[in-house]
Amino acid sequence: MKIIDLLKDNKPHLSCELFPPKKWENLEAAKTVVAEMAALKPDYMSVTYGATGGTSKYTTDLLSEIQTKHKIPALGHLTCVSSDKATVDNMVSTYKANGIENILALRGDIPADSGFEPSKDFKHSCDLMAEIKSMGNFCIAGACYPEGHPESKSVEEDLEYTKLKVEAGCDFLITQMFFDNNILYNYMYKLMKKGIDVPIDAGIMPVTNKAQIARIISLSGNLVPPRFKMIVDRFGDDPLAMKQAGIAYATEQIIDLFANGVNCVHIYTMNHPEVAGEIFKNLSYIAPRAN
Ligand code: FAD
């Protein structure tokens, strides 16, 4: 099933992101995580893809498990920063052969090591989207950045390129995480002014430990609102209290998004079904799951 067909109605949608294992011996454990997450009945589940493609086999394994065994629409991430056309075509064909109709097309982060050779065939995600489009009738998603992509000079510049993604065939956009909903509302206004009218799936990260927040800020430069900082300062050294506060904060963010007409929320689960489960439970009347 194409995810874009799910997202167009006016109901609240919840989906989950997972990452694949790095090693074969952890695949069965990852499948258990998939099963526990699938039991929550998210509208769809996505699986990340290593920027250099090293774990692509496990990404496909988990996507097949989600879709074939658990009958939940699966969204396969795909990056191109280090891939040539043949590698990308092979991966898209593999997704197709496994019945995966939905692809999140990404450039990927440029690895810091000096010897890295960027792809000659794909400079940006829009090049990858055009390639996927040429290979079949896929539903294509792209990433967008309410606070601007870290490499962009401004949100405005990044929006110009976001528009190119939509013109290249991107059916819907998933946002980078944000911790202040006003940032998203402001961004959505800018998207509208640019004429970008594809569905926006709001990415929410439940921050359940102190180390996570330091990493998030260093990777994405996210703004941390004072209210959130107070929570980390107060509960960061008490793991159970921090987990509870992080779940409550993410739940409140999602309720506010739904109340303000943002219907699609994608949860960055960090492979923690119990965290996603608490959030789903908190939203059981707000975003009820189909039986
Ligand atoms: P692009 O769209 O290519 O944008 C990168 C930069 O180039 C931006 O500054 C943009 O403004 C600019 N740009 C875009 N198009 C053009 C153009 N035509 N000309 C000039 N400049 C341009 N990473 C992974 O490795 N694996 C994953 O599975 C993964 N999943 C993600 C899921 C989501 C929802 C998000 C938000 C991010 C994810 N990432 C993942 C991280 C992502 O790969 C990085 O943020 C990466 O730096 C940018 O990817 P992109 O697809 O947005 O790149």
Image (tube, helix red, strand yellow):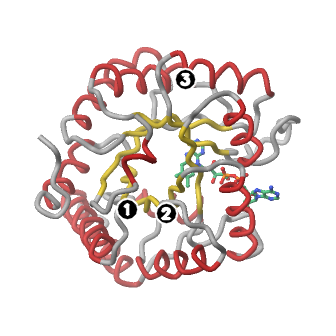
Sequence order check, earlier mark of 3 and 2:
3
Q: Residue 95 bears which disc, if any?
A: 3
Q: Indicate the position of residue 195 as horizontal and vertical percent values.
A: 63, 72
Q: Indicate the position of residue 217 as horizontal and vertical percent values.
A: 54, 66
Q: Are marks 2 and 1 in contact (CB under 8 Å)?
A: yes
Q: Indicate the position of residue 170 as horizontal and vertical percent values.
A: 61, 50
The residue furthest right is 120
Q: Amino acid at mark 3?
A: Tyr
Q: Quadrant of the N terminus?
A: top left
Element at label 2 = helix
The residue at the point 79 percent across, 27 percent down is 85
Whether label 3 lies within 8 Å of ligand 1 gets the answer no
Classify 11 as above or below 103: below
Of marks 3 and 2, the one in the foreground: 3
Q: Quadrant of residue 231?
A: bottom left
Q: Quadrant of the C terminus?
A: top left
The residue at the point 70 percent across, 45 percent down is 107
Q: Amino acid at mark 1?
A: Lys
The residue at the point 35 percent across, 40 percent down is 271
Q: Is the residue marked by circle 2 packed among few (<14), some (14-19), or many (20+) residues within 10 Å? A: few
Q: Quadrant of residue 282?
A: bottom left
Which residue corresponds to mark 2? 214
* Count of marks placed on residues: 3
Q: Residue 210 bears which disc, if any?
A: 1
Q: Amino acid at mark 2?
A: Ala
Asked if residue 13 lies left or right of residue 171, the reply is left
Classify 250 as above or below 229: above
The residue at the point 58 percent across, 18 percent down is 94
Q: Indicate the position of residue 84 as horizontal and vertical percent values.
A: 80, 28
